Image (cartoon, rainbow, N blue to C red):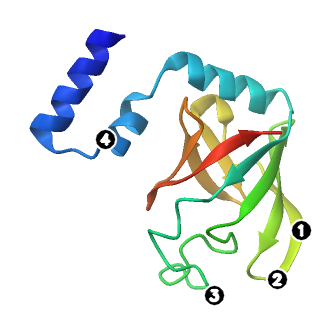
């Protein structure tokens, strides 16, 4: 493990590739990833905390336009409670489009591939429980409930 970490650090220093991108690309440890996959696929509840979004974009208002509304009806800075059962992600939280709290569900992601679906938007997670958006990079983290 140490040799792999040293090689990864050499790549970062030599190539100036952002470390967060490399951690998603190469993973942060198979065991940690398996732990999160096991928790999610067991049907146990967990929470997504979008605590890294305020420094990346302004998500104050819902516009309904993908170019001006970064995560659609999901709101940066909020927490969303998730349960995965029978191939479906049930997500409860604040919906900017309706202005209300509610539960919506989607089945367009596979946690075995380190993916989550929150109201149809797909996010990746790593072994540390960090959440990544394909457009904005690191946007939050997972919490077991």
Label 3 Cα crowd, 10 Å radius (few <14 / some 14-19 / many 20+): few
Determine the residue positioned at 30% across, 20% down: 5
Residue at image coords 37%, 10%: 1
- Disc nearer the start of the sequence (2/4): 4
Work out which quarter of the rendered image holds the C terminus and state it: top right
Crowding near the residue tagged with mark 2, few <14, some 14–19, many ≥20 C-alpha atoms within 10 Å? few
Alpha carbon distance from label 3 to label 2: 12 Å
Determine which of the numbered discs, if any, sits on residue 102 in the image: 1
Tell me: 73 left or right of 71: right
Q: Viewed as shown, does residue 112 lie left or right of 25? A: right
* Sooner in the amino-acid sequence: mark 4 or mark 3: 4
Residue for badge 3: 61
Residue 64 at x, y = what percent? 63, 85
| Label 1 vs 3, first from the N-terminus | 3
Q: Which mark is residue 18?
A: none
Q: What whole-number distance in Å separates the C-alpha atoms at marks 2 and 1? A: 9 Å
Which element carries disc 4, helix, strand or loop?
A: helix
Alpha-carbon distance for marks 1 and 3?
18 Å
Q: In the rendered structure, are the residues bearing label 2 and label 1 in contact, judged by CB atoms less than 8 Å apart?
A: yes
Q: Is residue 32 above or below residue 123?
A: above
The residue tagged 4 is 19
Write down the residue under mark 2.
98
């Amino acid at each position: 493990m140490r040799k792999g970490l040293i090689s990864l650090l050499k790549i970062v220093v030599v190539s100036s590739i952002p470390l967060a991108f490399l951690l998603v690309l190469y993973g942060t440890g198979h065991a940690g990833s398996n732990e999160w996959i096991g928790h999610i696929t067991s049907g146990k509840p967990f929470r997504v905390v979008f605590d890294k979004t305020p420094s990346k974009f302004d998500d104050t208002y819902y516009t309904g336009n993908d170019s001006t509304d970064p995560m659609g009806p999901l709101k940066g800075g909020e927490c969303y409670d998730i349960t995965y059962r029978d191939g479906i992600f049930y997500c409860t939280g604040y919906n900017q489009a309706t202005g209300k709290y509610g539960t919506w569900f989607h089945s367009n992601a596979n946690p075995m591939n380190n993916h989550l679906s929150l109201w149809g938007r797909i996010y990746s997670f790593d072994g540390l429980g960090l959440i990544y958006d394909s457009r904005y990079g690191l946007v939050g983290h997972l919490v077991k409930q």
